[in-house]
Image: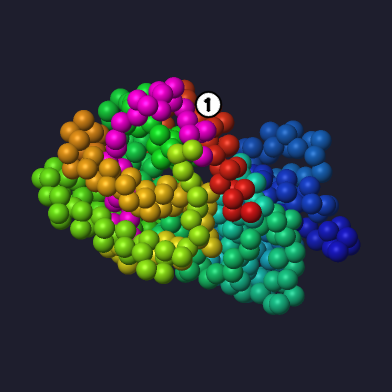
Amino acid sequence: MSSEKETVQLGIIGAGGMGRFYAQRFSAAGWKNVFVCDLPSKYETLREEYKDSPIQVLKDGFHVSRQCDWIMYAVEAEYIEAVVEKFGPATKMGAIVSGQTSVKMPEITAFRKHLPEDVHIVSCHSMHGPGVNPKGQPLVVIRERATDQVYDLVLRILSCFESNMVHLSAQEHDRITADTQAVTHAAFLSMGSAWKANSQFPWLVPHFVGGIENVKVNVAMRIYSNKWHVYAGLAIMNPVAKDQIFQYARSVADLFKLMIKEKEEEFRQRVHAGRDFVFGGSQKDHAPILLSDEILDEYSLSKIPREQRQPNSHLSLLAMVDCWYTLGLNPYEHMVCQTPLFRLWMGITEYLFRNDSMLEDTIQAALYRKETRSDDMEFVTCARGWAECVDLGSMHAYEKRFTDTASFFQDRFAESNVVGNKMIAMISKNIVD
């Protein structure tokens, strides 16, 4: 094994967050020949950054492709084909090519189209961001074209992450991420847009305070403090995701219409139907994620005392379960590919729907508490706006919607990320345990 780590050359095309994360992990694990590159314009800056590191910086993807035995494309999903088309034909004979994009079908298609036939393809996707400890987190491995010997080598290379390896096809990966990440992100993006539209900082509003609300606020802030393209590529380039996001927006609107008409029986039946489908039957035996107000109160940005909290309709959570029910999706089937954000989202949804008295309070607030009606209306508008943006397939429109909202909250990102990181660490520890 030691000779393997001394001779096999690992190359990463793209020195963004995940590219750097992979390079640093490989180097720390004892792989002696780790190479990275980025845009030629960043070469000197990158070389200066790594001058005291064993990680070596190459000029561009041609140098990485010609030299390395294992090559990972860590580029934005939007640009994967263009980058592979440019550097792929130069790939070293017999090398192994991988990718870290969040949407796999376009990536695999680009590999098959532009790589030489004598190149192996084993892709991967760490289901978390670069700031998360990978131990115990899902790491999807996609064996598209490789011998047993080559595949075993890839697994040894990736073993340094101590992640839970999940073996899927590209199609399975994209379906699961559409069912989980894309819809989850759409919900949090809609929350942020609604708060911005109402000129609200939610941690200052009594009905946005509490255990469940802490997750909503912290995760929404975490998403908006990241790069927009991470979420845009996953939503726009995955055709399955469009259907899921559209249905979520429709569920939000349908429930809201029942709320404003105060059609209690129909509203209650619909909420309970979703609850019974997702959390009833055999799902009753599923081990709960065990999130509660007592746990989540530790991760608050608010200074409002607990006794001053006010009821909330939790329309975002009611609509999520309605969306799963309408599409016939069982989210528990996808826990094998859970991200920390999806686990938190599942945790608070499960907490609400498995607590009969809390769910009843939520139903009553949704139907009859007029104080939150304007907030719910804005959420409906924003959820539909994000769905239309994804349906149009416009990266530019997505970027503008995202950055406009992010700029409204940017002064609180530093504080929210500290709190959010603690919350992610808590949920990640529960995954490992």
Q: Residues within 10 Å of mark 1 (few under 14, many from 20)?
A: few
Q: Position of residue 340 (x, y in %)?
A: 53, 49
Q: Is residue 35 left or right of residue 163?
A: right
Tell me where residue 295 appears, x and y as whole percent: 51, 39
Range of the magenta residues? Answer: 295-324
Task: Specify the farthest residue to the front.
Answer: 357
Q: Which residue is at 59% across, 50% downward?
A: 430
Query: In this rendering, does residue 428 appear at all?
Result: yes
Q: Which residue is at a point 55% across and 69% down the rendered structure image?
A: 168
Q: How is the image coloured?
A: rainbow
Q: Amino acid at mark 1?
A: Glu
Per the image, label 1 sits on a secondary structure element best described as helix
**Which of the pair 110/320 is nearer the observer?**
320
Magenta stretch encompasses residue 318:
yes
Which residue is at the far right?
A: 3
> Residue 224 at what x, y percent from top left?
44, 36
* In the depicted structure, whether residue 288 falls above or below residue 358: below
Extreme-bottom residue of the structure:
147
Point out the image quarter for the N terminus. Answer: bottom right
194 horizontally vs 395: left or right = left
Q: Specify whether residue 127 is painted magenta.
A: no
- Looking at this view, is 185 or 115 the one in front? 185
Of 7 and 139, the residue lying toward us: 139
Residue on which disc 1 sits: 415
Q: Main secondary structure of the magenta part?
A: helix
